[in-house]
Image (tube, rainbow, N blue to C red):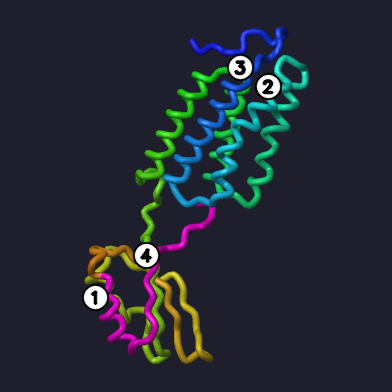
Amino acid sequence: MFTSIIESVSSGLTITDAVMCTAASLLFGFVIAFTYMHSGKYTKSFVLSLVMMPALVQVVIMMVNGNLGTGVAVMGAFSLVRYRSLPGSSREISTIFFAMAIGLTTGMGYITFAAVTTVILCLAMMLLSKSSFGCDGRPDKELRITIPESLDYTEVFDDIFEKYTNEASLEKVKTTNLGSMFNLVYHIDMKDEKQEKVMIDEIRCRNGNLTVMCSKVQASKDEL
């Protein structure tokens, strides 16, 4: 069974226990931040917050341990997620809860349990981020093509897409240059990424060498 290194609240918190718990919190924070960095996009400020979060929560929990105010303190600590809940993605929010839960565990002295939990959840985070689990199968390329108004955009590139893509769907049509041109936005799934330039060259021959741009589909912030 997992046991706490803090044996008795009534006897007071020893310096050794406090240092061990704080060091463990910072170590686990680094592990969580490192895993987050290697599972998707990130910013330095958010990564630093992940490093510090377990230690900060652990200090709060240690200071109120054994008092009736513990429940209120825990609620107050977890309410800190508010500062990220509005602008943050679901991935960021769940990682913050992860870091705070580890801080709560170390604050109660259960360092071994916190270590096991950190390892298991970090492995799960890494594996899930690298796997296709949860993907909806949408094409991952966005193709923007400018054509003159004289071209019928409904089927003008169908033969090219059939040759080079597994799937191609017209997502948006917009007039430009006072209505003399159309901007077409397609989502495509390439059969062979190495054939991208060849496909674009054929499209340029078809659209009169006007602008063609191919890029990754922009994910919504909640998907990052």
Q: For residue 99, which numbered disc appears in the image?
A: none
Q: CA distance from mark 4 to mark 1?
A: 15 Å
Residue at image mark 4: 141
Residue at image mark 3: 17
Mark 2, secondary structure of its residue:
helix
Q: Position of residue 212 (x, y in %)?
A: 37, 79
The residue located at (69%, 32%) in the rendering is 77
Picture quadrant of residue 55: top right
User: Are dots 4 and 3 in contact, CB under 8 Å?
Assistant: no
Q: For residue 198, which numbered disc appears in the image?
A: 1
Q: CA distance from mark 2 to mark 1?
A: 64 Å
Residue at image mark 2: 62
Which one is earlier in the sequence, the residue at label 2 or at label 1?
2
Which residues are drawn in magenta?
A: 196-224
Instruction: Give above or below for 142 relative to 95.
Output: below
- Alpha-carbon neighbours of circle 4 within 10 Å: few (<14), some, or many (≥20)? some
